[in-house]
Image: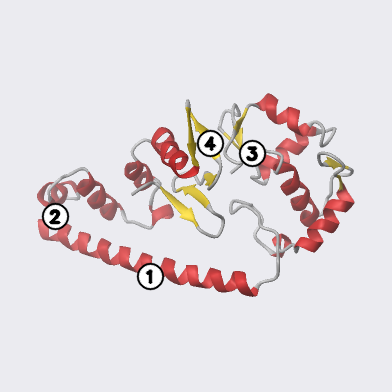
Amino acid sequence: MTGFSFEASSQKYCCSACGKKFHRGLIYQIGEQLCEAEKAAELHVLTSHGDRLEYLIELGKGVHGLSEVQSKVLLGKYLGKDDETIAREIGNRSASTVRNHRFQLQKKRKEAQIFLAIMGLMESRDEAASPSFIEFHPDLPVADDRVLISREEAAELEAKYLDQKEEPSIIKFPRKEKAKLVVLRRVAQLFTPGKSYSPGEVDAILKPCMYDYATLRRYLIEYRFLKRTPGGGEYWRD
């Protein structure tokens, strides 16, 4: 288990734990090391989340769908424990109970693989049949028809709200959600995906875009075009 996955449609490697993405073809700096996207994703998982399986299991049933007993069985096998030891740890059950749980987990794995294949085929068909819409990141906290914006509509909104002679400068910050999303998406493109920025560097990039750059920064975080560490000392764009 790598702790990250590859999204063929977007050509990105995605951390399974926190969702941070690394674009194929770009070079990233992880600590003192410069590396390609796949290696960067691997190092990110190792340095940011420690043991990958333990971290993912600790996310809880609401995230991975495993019961507490299933989680203990998986973790026990991962740590090299025998069935008798695991059986005691899950409530003094029998070793045959542990074997049955392992069988059910293998069945669950096969079902998950088939489900992913089905969803992949559905997405391929949807992409071929749908009109040309602009793409937003998967963490966008808006999930209704306001995100269905064609490339033509986006171009019209950018022309209305942005002066793009050099870098995008906001003529007037829009109130309507669609226009707001288009403007924030365009401003977010000033940040290199996967690169870390200090608060001062973020402000320096945003100041030419809008006089009230602090509000602009807040919107970028609120709509998750930019991510930041809990203390606000580091910013990045997936």
Q: Which residue is mark 4?
A: 28
Quickly name the residue at label 3: 192
Query: Which of pointers 3 and 1 indicates the residue nearer the eye?
Result: 3
Tally of numbered tags: 4
Q: Amino acid at mark 3?
A: Thr
Q: Which residue is mark 2?
A: 93
**Residue located 82% across and 33% down the image:** 208
Of the numbered discs 3 and 1, the one sitting upstream in the chain is 1
- Is residue 90 rendered to the left or right of residue 133? left
Q: Taking the image as drawn, is residue 94 in sight?
A: no
Does the residue at mark 3 contact the one at mark 2 (Cβ under 8 Å)? no
Label 2 element class: loop
Rendered view: 53 above or below 146:
above
Instruction: Please identify, in this view, whether the residue under mark 4 or under mark 1 is nearer the observer.
Output: 4
Q: Nearer the viewer, mark 2 or mark 1?
A: 1
Q: How far separated are the C-alphas under marks 3 and 4?
A: 10 Å
Measured Cα–Cα span from mark 4 to mark 1: 33 Å
Tag nearer the camera, 2 or 4: 4
Q: Is residue 157 above or below residue 51?
A: below
Q: CA distance from mark 3 to mark 2?
A: 53 Å
Amino acid type, label 2: Arg
Picture quarter containing residue 113? bottom left
